[in-house]
């Protein structure tokens, strides 16, 4: 069957004839892959920045943002059924007895580093026609979300991040506010970056009631700026506004959600985070060497303003469940803007265009099957 694979030893990317999986055993389900999203991680692996094949394999099948249909289930499968739409998690637990995170199903907090990730680290990914996997790592998607279901995995980044935001805000004497119109109502959030992670983060903040701003390099009036405004956000063009002007326009910034992977911008914008604010890092920058940071100002601000900075990676099954629920809300409130996040669907034969040539649009998808 067709699969998109990288060969690190050859520094090659190509479509391969990958072996079909066997029939599902106890607790397993066989999936027909429908859509697989392309993201910056895939592009970095295709440029051989990282990516590790399974032991004994010369290649790694790419793809971690998936949507599939169940075509066969093994014995004792209880949570999925034939013809279900499913999204499959990416990170798999290590088997080290000292890792309490993995032992409790929170491999996103693995302490040993021996986890595996489909399409990234020591496990083949989803950019192929058929995939066999354990039902424990699958989440069922409602049928009406078929055309946007591939957005679930990137949305989990925001879901996990915002769950942690409320957890850390429990440190405040009055605790996080719980309001019928959204926990974030009355708070102000700034999203850095207008890529898929930033745009999905923007929607997640809006449904929680945040007054949401996006700061990105596209000019005012651009397609991305108009998209932000169409969903009720406010767009701030980075090339036309300094950070001081951003702070003046927004006021006290309660949350900054970084989705760029650009260290210089992140530390620059950290200086305008508000009192009791939280700064969330989601981007993974390339290893390009040190940058200059106004460390004394950052440290003074964090201490005197009770600020917190944390990073977040991958996601547990609970984040996938929350992403599916939020995606349904997005579909109800913003059906057209939601679908505009998917720039196009392409056959796997065009993978070099998607991963090697300059990127464009928002979310591009490799399609293996229509239904």
Image: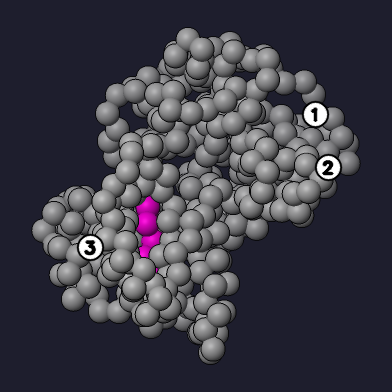
Residue 204 among those drawn in magenta? no
Instruction: Say left or right for 225 vs 350.
Output: left
Nearest the viewer among 145 and 216 is 216
Residue 287 position in % (x across, y down) = 38, 37
| Sequence-earlier tag: 1 or 2 | 1
Nearest the viewer among 138 and 10 is 10
Residue 109 position in % (x across, y down) = 64, 52
Instruction: Say left or right for 104 vs 326.
Output: right
Residue 102 in sight in this render = yes
* Residue at x 47%, y 10% (from the top left corner): 10
Quickly name the residue at label 3. 235
Residue 182 position in % (x across, y down) = 48, 78
Cα separation, mark 2 vs mark 3, equals 47 Å
Quickly name the residue at label 1. 24
- The image shows residue 232, relative to residue 187, as above or below, that is above
Residue 257 among those drawn in magenta? yes
């Amino acid at each position: 069957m067709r699969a998109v694979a990288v060969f690190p030893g050859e520094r090659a990317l190509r479509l391969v004839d990958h072996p079909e999986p066997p029939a599902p055993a106890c607790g397993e389900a066989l999936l027909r892959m429908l859509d697989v999203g392309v993201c910056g991680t895939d592009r970095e692996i295709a440029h051989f920045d990282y990516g590790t094949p399974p032991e004994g394999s010369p290649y790694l099948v790419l793809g971690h943002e998936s949507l599939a249909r169940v075509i066969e289930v093994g014995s004792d499968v209880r949570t999925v059924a034939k013809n279900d739409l499913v999204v499959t998690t990416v990170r798999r637990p290590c088997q080290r007895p000292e890792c309490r995170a993995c032992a409790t199903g929170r491999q996103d907090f693995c302490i040993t580093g021996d986890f595996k990730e489909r399409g990234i680290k020591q496990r083949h990914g989803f950019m192929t026609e058929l995939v066999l996997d354990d039902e424990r790592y699958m989440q069922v998607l409602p049928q009406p979300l078929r055309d946007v279901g591939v957005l679930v995995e990137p949305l989990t980044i925001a879901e996990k991040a915002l769950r942690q935001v409320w957890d850390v805000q429990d440190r405040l004497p009055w605790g996080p506010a719980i309001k019928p119109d959204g926990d974030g109502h009355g708070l102000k959030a700034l999203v850095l970056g207008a890529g898929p992670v930033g745009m999905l983060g923007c929607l997640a903040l809006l449904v929680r009631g945040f007054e949401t701003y996006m700061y990105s390099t596209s000019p005012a009036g651009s397609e991305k700026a108009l998209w932000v405004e169409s969903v009720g956000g406010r767009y701030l063009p980075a090339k036309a506004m300094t950070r001081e002007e951003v702070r003046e326009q927004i006021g006290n910034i309660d949350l900054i959600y970084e989705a760029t992977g650009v260290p210089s911008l992140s530390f620059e914008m950290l200086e305008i985070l508000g009192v009791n604010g939280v700064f969330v890092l989601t981007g993974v920058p390339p290893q390009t060497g040190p940058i200059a940071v106004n460390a004394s100002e950052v440290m003074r601000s964090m201490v005197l303003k009770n600020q917190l900075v944390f990073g977040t990676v991958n996601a547990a099954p609970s984040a996938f469940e929350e992403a599916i629920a939020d995606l349904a809300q997005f579909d109800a409130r913003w059906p057209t803007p939601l679908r505009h996040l998917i720039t196009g669907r392409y056959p796997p034969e065009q993978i070099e265009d998607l991963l090697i040539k300059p990127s464009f649009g928002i979310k591009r998808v490799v399609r293996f099957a229509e239904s």
